[in-house]
């Protein structure tokens, strides 16, 4: 028994908040896999790497040093916790995540953590590709308008000038790319418990998950 809980779902579905609370409650570790793709996107922008340059990307993945705990993330010694949460890095991370060398480069970090057990891992492919043998898999969803509203509330604190309309359009585009890419797209499978959080509170979602956990 590894005690791995996977939570997949689209942007703004509440995966981050819910996974963190769940991990705290269970005394498990927590891995936000989206933060890994955001960290790579940050480095791609920092080093001005062209997304078509496969060798440069492979080299980046071989050398990047990502350190993360439940609160902070750093890339090659620079704290990027706040910088990776912008709309720009969100978009770039989605583009970067469709590239096979990037996914391959991040696979073992995620897989190894799951093999150690007692972890809540969240993202787009955690229950399908990273740890398909997990005992407990969830797919967290919410309506597009509600997801855009949640994301907008986060983003407006970071950059004035952002609009709800633009946020909705960005999310829609990103979901489409994340769900239709060839490599490990966001997919809901039959062995996942589906939760629509559109009209549920955070606590209600956590309770639903706690009740569904197989012992
Ligand atoms: O969850 P997030 O918004 O922080 O994720 C950023 C991007 O990373 C998302 O648009 C797609 C990608 N991603 C992925 O491809 N696979 C994952 N397991 C997690 C994130």
Image (cartoon, grey):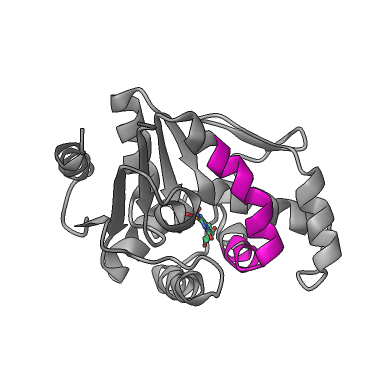
Q: Residue at x 80, y 57 (%)?
A: 58
Instruction: Indicate left or right for 201 with 90 as reference.
Output: left
Position of residue 97 measured from the top left corner of the image (x, y, whole percent): 60, 62
Give the residue at x 41% y 74%: 165
Q: Quadrant of the C terminus?
A: top left
Q: In this rendering, does residue 156 appear at all?
A: no
Tell me the magenta residue range.
91-112
Q: Residue at x 21, y 56 (%)?
A: 195
Residue 150 visible in the picture: yes
Q: Is 188 placed left or right of 73 in the picture?
A: left
Apparent side of residue 83 relative to residue 17 in the rendered image (left or right): right
Residue occupying the point 45% across, 72% down: 179
Q: Quadrant of the N terminus?
A: top left
How far across and how far down the image is residue 202, in percent? 23, 43
Question: Within the image, what quadrant is residue 141 found in?
Answer: bottom left
Indicate yes or no whether the magenta region holds residue 212: no
Q: Residue 11 location, x and y as percent?
A: 41, 60
Please say whether residue 108 is one of the residues in the magenta stretch: yes
Between residue 106 and residue 158, name the one nearer to us.
Answer: 106
**Where is 42 relative to 209, above or below?**
below
Position of residue 54 relative to residue 20, above or below, is: below
Q: Nearer the viewer, residue 88 or 39?
A: 39
**In-image side of 175 versus 59 (left or right):** left
């Amino acid at each position: 028994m590894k005690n791995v809980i996977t939570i997949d779902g689209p942007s703004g579905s509440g995966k981050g908040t819910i996974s963190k609370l769940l991990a705290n409650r269970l005394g498990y570790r927590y891995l936000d896999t989206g933060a890994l793709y955001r960290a790579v996107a940050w480095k791609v922008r920092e080093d001005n790497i062209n997304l078509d340059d496969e060798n440069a990307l492979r080299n980046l993945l071989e050398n990047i040093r990502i350190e993360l705990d439940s609160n902070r993330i750093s890339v090659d010694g620079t704290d990027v916790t706040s910088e990776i949460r912008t709309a720009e890095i969100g978009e770039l991370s989605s583009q970067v995540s469709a590239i096979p060398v990037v996914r391959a480069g991040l696979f073992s970090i995620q897989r190894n953590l799951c093999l150690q057990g007692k972890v809540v891992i969240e993202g787009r492919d955690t229950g399908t590709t990273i740890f398909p043998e997990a005992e407990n898999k969830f797919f967290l969803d919410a309506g597009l308008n509600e997801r855009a509203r949640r994301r907008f509330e986060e983003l407006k604190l970071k950059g004035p000038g952002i609009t709800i309309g633009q946020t909705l359009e960005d999310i829609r585009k990103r979901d489409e790319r994340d769900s239709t890419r060839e490599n490990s797209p966001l997919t809901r499978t039959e062995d996942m418990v589906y939760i629509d959080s559109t009209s549920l509170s955070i606590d209600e979602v956590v309770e639903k998950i706690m009740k569904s956990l197989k012992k």
